Image: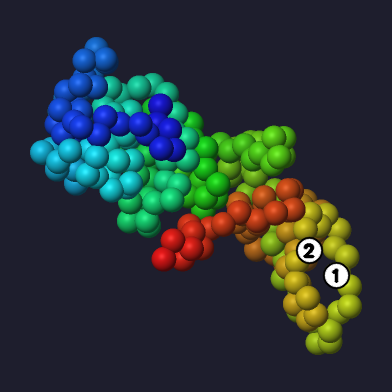
C-alpha cells in the first residue's frame, strides 16, 4: 500500500530504509529493490528527509513494490507531482501490470492517467458510484459530438441520448450515449465522460502542472 503522502523515516538513508523494509517482508526481492532504486534515480547514501516530494513518492513506491505483492494499493500516487515524476511512477505501475501480471488498485482524480494504465474503472462523485465497468466498454458507450452553426443559438441544441451539453453561440459540444445517436461523433475522453455523468470536470495533469508553476 502507498498513501498519497507516505510517512517515511526521514533520518534514514535510502539504503538503510531499504534494509529496514526488507525485515518486514519475507518475500522481499533485494535484487528487484535495487533495480527499482536505480530506475527511480534514488541515491542510496542520501537521507530521506532531504529528498524532494517526488523522490519520497518514488521511495514509497519502491517499498510497496519490492516484495512483489499480488495486489498493490495506491492512493493518489502522482498527486501534486511534476510531469517527469508522474511519468516515472506511471511507467512503474504499467510495468507491474504488463510484465508481472499483478493487480494494481489505485485512486486518482487525474483521469488522463487513469485512461493510460487502467483496464477497469469506477467513477465516484460525492460519495456515489456513477459509473463502473471495463474501460474499453465505457469508452465505446460514449461519444463526443461537436455541432457548429452559422448563426448564434440562444439555447443548447437537443440531441437524443445527450448526457451533457457545453458551449455557447455557434459551437456546442455534446457527450452522449453512443447507442442513441446517429450523428457523426468522436471518442470521448474519461474526463468528458465524467462530466457527462457527474456534471463537473476534473483538472487534467497539464492544468495541474500550470497551477504549480
User: From this viewpoint, which residue is outermost toward the bottom?
Assistant: 150
Q: Are marks 1 and 2 in contact (CB under 8 Å)?
A: yes
- Quadrant of the image for the C terminus? bottom left
- Quadrant of the image for the N terminus? top left
Which color scheme did the rendering employ for the protein?
A: rainbow
Residue at (15%, 28%) from the top-left corner? 16
From the top left corner, tell me how far across and down residue 52 is, in percent.
28, 48
Task: Choose top left, top right, bottom left or bottom right for residue 175.
Answer: bottom right
From the top left corner, tell me how far across and down residue 6 is, in percent.
37, 34
Residue at (19%, 46%) from the top-left corner? 41
The residue nearer to you, when weighing 170 against 17, is: 17
Q: Is residue 91 visible?
A: no
Q: Which mark is residue 59?
A: none
Among numbered discs 1 and 2, the one appearing first in the sequence:
1
Task: Choose top left, top right, bottom left or bottom right for residue 83.
Answer: bottom left
Residue 152 drawn above or below residue 213: below
The residue nearer to you, when weighing 56 against 200, is: 56
Q: Secondary structure at mark 2?
A: strand
Q: Secondary structure at mark 1?
A: loop
Relative placement, left or right, of 114 versus 58 is right
The residue nearer to you, when weighing 9 against 33, is: 9
From the top left corner, tell me how far across and down residue 174 is, in percent.
75, 63
Residue at (39%, 51%) from the top-left corner? 81
Q: Is residue 25 visible?
A: yes
Q: Which residue is mark 2?
A: 165
Residue 51 drawn above or below residue 146: above
Q: Which residue is mark 1?
A: 156
Q: CA distance from mark 1 to mark 2?
A: 7 Å
Residue at (84%, 87%) from the top-left corner? 151
Residue 152 drawn above or below residue 187: below
Amino acid at each position: 500500500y502507498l498513501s498519497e503522502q507516505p510517512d517515511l523515516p526521514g533520518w534514514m538513508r535510502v539504503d538503510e530504509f531499504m534494509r529496514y523494509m526488507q525485515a518486514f517482508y519475507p518475500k522481499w526481492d533485494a535484487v528487484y529493490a535495487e533495480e527499482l532504486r536505480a530506475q527511480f534515480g534514488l541515491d542510496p547514501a542520501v537521507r530521506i528527509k532531504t529528498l524532494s516530494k517526488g523522490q519520497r513518492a518514488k521511495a514509497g513506491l519502491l517499498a510497496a513494490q519490492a516484495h512483489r505483492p499480488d495486489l498493490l494499493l495506491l492512493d493518489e500516487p502522482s498527486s501534486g507531482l511534476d510531469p517527469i515524476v508522474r511519468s516515472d511512477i506511471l511507467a512503474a505501475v504499467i510495468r507491474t501490470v504488463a510484465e508481472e501480471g499483478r493487480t494494481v488498485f489505485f485512486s486518482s482524480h487525474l483521469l488522463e492517467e487513469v485512461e493510460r494504465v487502467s483496464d477497469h474503472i469506477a467513477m465516484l462523485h460525492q460519495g456515489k458510484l456513477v459509473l463502473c465497468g471495463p474501460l474499453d466498454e465505457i469508452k465505446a458507450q460514449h461519444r463526443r459530438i461537436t455541432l457548429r452553426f452559422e448563426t448564434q443559438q440562444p439555447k443548447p441544441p437537443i440531441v437524443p441520448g445527450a448526457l451533457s451539453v457545453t458551449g455557447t453561440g455557434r459551437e456546442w459540444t455534446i457527450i452522449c450515449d453512443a447507442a442513441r445517436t446517429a450523428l457523426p461523433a468522436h471518442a470521448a475522453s474519461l474526463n468528458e465522460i465524467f462530466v457527462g455523468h457527474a456534471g463537473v470536470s476534473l483538472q487534467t495533469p497539464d492544468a495541474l502542472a500550470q497551477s504549480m508553476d
